[in-house]
Structures are given as C-alpha cells and as structure tokens.
Amino acid sequence: MYNLVLPYLLGTAFSVAVVVMALAAYALFRSKAAMYEHLSRKLPDACRYEDLHARVEDLEKERDRVQDELFSARQIIAERAEAEEWLRNNREELLSLEAERAQQEHLRAELMGLQNQLGEEKDRQLRLAKELQAMEVQCDALKEKRDELQATIEAANAKSEQLANEATNLKKTKAALESECAGLESQLSAQKAQLEDAKASLERRLRAIDQELAEATTNRDRLLAEVEKACADAEEKRTRTIQGCREDEETALRDHAAKVAELKKELAALRESMFEERKDLEATHDRTVQARQELATAKAELAGLEQACRRQGIELQEIRKKTDQDKIADSKRTSELWQPVFKRNDHEPERTVDELKQLDIVRNHLESHGLMFSDRVVKAFHTSLKVSDISPLVVLAGISGTGKSELPRRYAEAMNMHFLNMAVQPRWDSPQDMFGFFNYLEGRFRSTPLGRALIQMDPYHGTNGRGWNAPQGWADENSLSDQMMLVLLDEMNLARIEYYFSEFLSRLETRRGIDNLSNDEDRRKAAIALDIGSSSDGNAMMQLFVGTNVLFVGTMNEDETTQTLSDKVVDRANVLRFGRPRNLRFDGGSNGKQQGAAKGPLAHEEWRSWCEGELSGKDSKKVDEWIARLNEAMTAIRRPFAHRTNLAIRSYVANYPGLGQDADALRHAMSDQLEQKIFPKFRGLDPTEPSVRKALDAVQKVLDELEDKQLISAINESRREHVFIWMGVDRFEQEAQA
C-alpha cells in the first residue's frame, strides 16, 4: 500500500507541475501576443501587411501605367499647343489681310474723289479754254477794227460808206463767234459723256474688286470658324481621352490615337485651304497694286491739268481785270453765305440760375412730348454736352425708334438753344458736304445751312484779315455769337465719318490748347478754311471759327447698312447707347409747346457758368484712384488710355449735375464714363482668354464699388459669349420702377 501512495503522489505532483507550467507558458504567450499587438498598432500600415512586397510591385505597376497615361496626355497638350500656335500665326496674317482690305477701300474712295476732281477740273479747263478762245477772237477782231478805225480817221469824210460796211462785217463776226461757241459747247458735252463712260468703267472695276475682297473675307471668316471649331473639338477629345484612360486604358488610348490622326488630317486640309485662299488674296493684292499705279497716273495727269488751269486762270484773271468782270464776280461770289438761318431775337432772356431747376424743366418738356427718359439719361446727355472742350461730339447710338433724334431736339427747345438738323447722306466724303463748296462754273459759293449758321455763331466776325466780306450792317442784324446752338447730325454713320467729320473734329479739339482770344495765329489753327474762290484782291480763303457756343450731337443706328465708329472718333466723343426701351412712348399727345422754358434764348455766358465744375480734394483723390486702376486693367489687354481720356473722365465727373449735393452723383458720373469710354474698348475680344478675363475682373471690381446694378448686369450679359459685344445699358427700367 505504501509502495502505491508514493508513485501516486509523484504523478499528481508532476501533473500539477505540468498544468502550472502550461498555464505559465500560456500566460507568457498571451503577454507576448498582447505586446506584439500593441507594437504592431504603432507601426505604419505598410509594415503590418504580410504581402507588402506584392503590394509594392502592384503599386509600381500602377505607377508605370499612370506615367504612360501622363506621357500620352502631355503629347496631346503639346499637339494642342502646336495647333494654337499655328492658329495665332494665321490670325496675324489674316488681320494683316483685313488691314490691307481697309487700305484698299480707302484707296478706292480716294480714287473716286480724284475722278470727281478730275471731271471738275476738265470741265473747268474746257470752260476756260472756251472763254479764252472767245476772248482771243474778240481781241483779234478788236485789233482789226482798231487798224481799220485808224485808216478811217485819216479819211473820215471820204469813207463813211466804208464804216457802214465795217459795222456789217462786225455783225457777221459776232454771228460767227456765236456759232463757234455753240460748237465748243457740243464738244464739251461729248467730252463730258466720255468722262462719264470712263467713270462708269472704273466703278465697275472697283465693284469687281470689292466683290472679290468680300468673297476673300467670307472665306477667311469661314476658315477661322473651322480652325476654332477644330481647336474646341481637340480640347473636348483630350478631356474625353483622359477620362477614358481612367476607365479603360487600352481602348481609350487606341481611340485617342485615331482621333489625333483624324485631327491632323483636318488641320492639314485647313492649311492647304488657307494656302489656296492666300494665293487668291495675293492675286487680289496684285490687282490692287495695278489699280494704285493707275491712280498714280491719274494723279499725275490731274497735276498737269491743274498746272495748265492755273496758267489759264492767271491769264483769264488779267483779262477780267481789264474788262471789269471781277467787280461783278465779287458781288455774287459769297452772297449765299450771308443769308441767315436763324432770326435774331433781342428779347432779354429770363435766365434760370440753378442748373438743376433747368434740368427739371427739360424733363417736364420731354414728358410733355411723350418721351420718357430716366434721370440718368438726361443728366448723362447734359453733362456730355458740357464737356465739349474735351469731347466735342456726343453720339447717341442704338436701335431705331428709341427717341435718339427727339432727345436733342426737345432738349434744345427746353434750353432755348437754336437747333439745326442735318441729315447725313451716304455720298458724303469730305467736309465740303457739311459746309458747302465753291462752284467754279457758276463763280459762287454754294453754302449749306450749317455753313450759314456757323457764320452767324462765329464770335470773331468783326476781326480783320479773315477773308470776310459781309454786307454793311449784317453783324448787327444777324450775328448770334452770344447765344447757343445745337447741331444734330442725323444718321451720321450712313457715310464714313472719317471722310467728312474727322478733320473738323480735330479742329474742334484744337480749341483747347490755343489762345483764341488775343492770338490771331493760334486761332487760325482751329479755324475752318472755306474756299470762296479768288476775289479781286487775290484772297481765296475765308476763316470760320467754331466756338463753344456750338454743340454737336450725332445719331447712329447700328445695323448692316451703317458704318462703325473708329477709335479716333470714339476717343474724342461721349457715346450714349440706347437699347430696347421698356417704358418709352411717343403717342403724339403733346401740344408741341415748350413747357416752362425761358422766353429768351440761352446766353453763351450762362452756359459757360455751368461748365466750371471742379473736384474737391477727397473726390479728386478717389477719382484718380479709380482711373489708375482702370488704366492698369486696360494695359493688360494692350489698350491703355492716355492724358486725353484721363482729362475727359475727370472733366465729366467734375461737371456732373448735383456733384457735392447728391451723394450718388460721384458714383453715377464715374459709372457713365465706364459705360462710354472703357467698355467699348473690349469690343471684339474673347472674354474667356486669361488676360481679357483678368482685365474685366479688375474693371468689375471698380464697378462693384460704384454699385451700378444695371451696368453690372449688362457686363455679365456681354461676357457670356466668346466675343465681347457692347450694347450699352438699358436705363429705361429705372424709370419704369420709379
């Protein structure tokens, strides 16, 4: 029994020891496992993955795939950049071709003008030749008669019958001269017909050249549209290719390669088409060069004719002096210039000292005629007229039927200004169409109403040495230099404004930098020289000075039948644009009478007192800051402005009605100048281009400070398209809400 207990105890102790050791080993394993778990949590995720090497290999494969995609995308971007570079190069070439076409149009107009002058000079030469021939025949007859009379005096009593025969011979000579004059007139008619045929032939050639230029321009526009569409398609294809690579790499790359090849074929076809178009334009250019050579030949012939006419004119002038014909010519040469357009009213005007009250009269007068213009429009029009020293022209542009012609007419009535309406004709091509011309066939100056009215408004009518030959007492009865006149050039863009108004506009602008009160030489720089024909004293020019008592307004409808304004005209004008009105009516219910206007004419002195506005220190600093920011923005698109525009903006703001009294006047005036002088310079640009977008954003920040919601809305509307088209602001909504 004793022998069994010992082994049992040993076995039990061994079992307990094994269990204890197993529990200790388990506890040690659990503690090490917990420690490993704790350490593994502190390690990065990549160290905890068992398949780290496999994952790294997969990521490297993914990296290689992404690098291949990036290389393909870079190739696409490089191809697109190459296409854009090619497009920019061709755009410059097309722009140069467009400039050449404009030059050709100018040369065509010059050619037509020279043809007209050539016809007039030939007519004049024929007339002078006929007169000289008649004079020579008369002189020969007089010489023969003198010899015969001398012989007759020696034997007067014996040869009385011979004198009677001589008288009969003189009558026959007179009849022969009359028949010869009739023959010369028939020859003159035949030569006129030949000139008309030659003119018609040249016009047909010019029309053919114009048609070819129009076709070339159409093809150019079509090619530009195709190139732009190709670039847009390339961009869209690039976007779709990149997206497709993410979804299905192999399929997208194959599609992209095929599309890029197709795009290259399209670009090659466009290049070939552009090459053919360029050859056509070069052929047109050769024809234009030939036309220029013909024009130079015509100019040389015209110079020869002018020289011959001068010689004949000198001889004719000597003959006229001997026969006392100059006295008769001087009496009728300028008689038409002294016919007054307006009658002088010496009634003392009841002046309205307060400018704002006078503007209230204007608004009431407009409403009485059924015209509903907002307060902003009336003040903008009035202020634009006040700064005529810097911006001599006010242009009212927009669609037909918005009251553009009625506004200046009724404004002049309410202000009691003299009003003259000049309807511009499509054939106008020189300042003579505005003021008149000297008719050499009739030997007299044919004046227009504008020319006669400007003579009445000339403040220096009594100054000597200006070529004036006014009738006795004319100035006392007809001069209106102390009053105001408003001239309306209706439909002024039916003809090319640069042809008939540009030179005159420069003269008006010159007034600002001269001493016109005491310096006669300075005043001549801004004066208009009217060719009134050579008088007996040899003075063929009459100086006409247009002072600040004459205001000029032009209307223009913007459609396919009219001409656009050049930058030269826009920089020297204030352009008010009229959109589709929402509350404009013209029901004809007016009685046609002035409502509350002064009884007498508006004095020039009173008008000048309204044009002496100045900016205060705070306002001046703010305006300078705005102008600097605007000029910086315009520099980004290479269209900065200089001193004239800066001075024009400051003068407009300083002369805005209510400045210093109305808290909104400064903002409204500056907003008007953005509308009239800044935003028109963005026309034709692409608002999506980075530089243009940046400039527009900078200008719009200034506009946000001005708080002009209507102008902001108009700008946002113009920025939606790929080409910036400035149509102005609809200010009629403001009146409707009021």
Image (tube, rainbow, N blue to C red):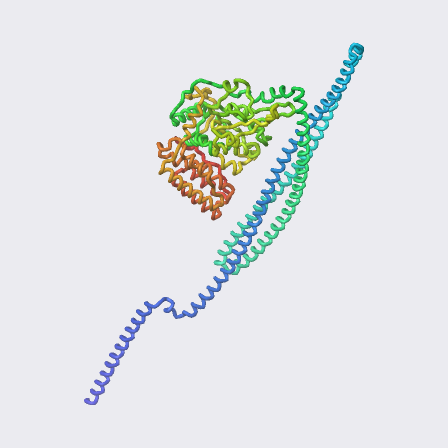
As displayed, is residue 18 above or below residue 500? below
Residue 84 location, x and y as percent? 54, 51
Residue 164 visible here: no
Q: Quadrant of residue 292?
A: top right
Q: Is 628 situated left or right of 429 in this image?
A: left
Front-most of 737 and 45?
A: 737
How many numbered marks does the figure carry?
0
Front-most of 271 and 19?
A: 271
As displayed, is residue 432 above or below residue 260? above
Residue 195 location, x and y as percent? 70, 30
- Quarter of the image with the C terminus in it: top left
Q: Quadrant of residue 702?
A: top left
> In the orientation shown, which residue stands out farthest toward the left?
2
> In the orientation shown, which residue stands out farthest toward the bottom?
3
As displayed, is residue 230 above or below residue 326? below
Residue for point 75% across, 23% down: 183
Residue for point 41% across, 28% down: 610
Q: Quadrant of residue 498?
A: top right
As displayed, is residue 369 above or below residue 667? above
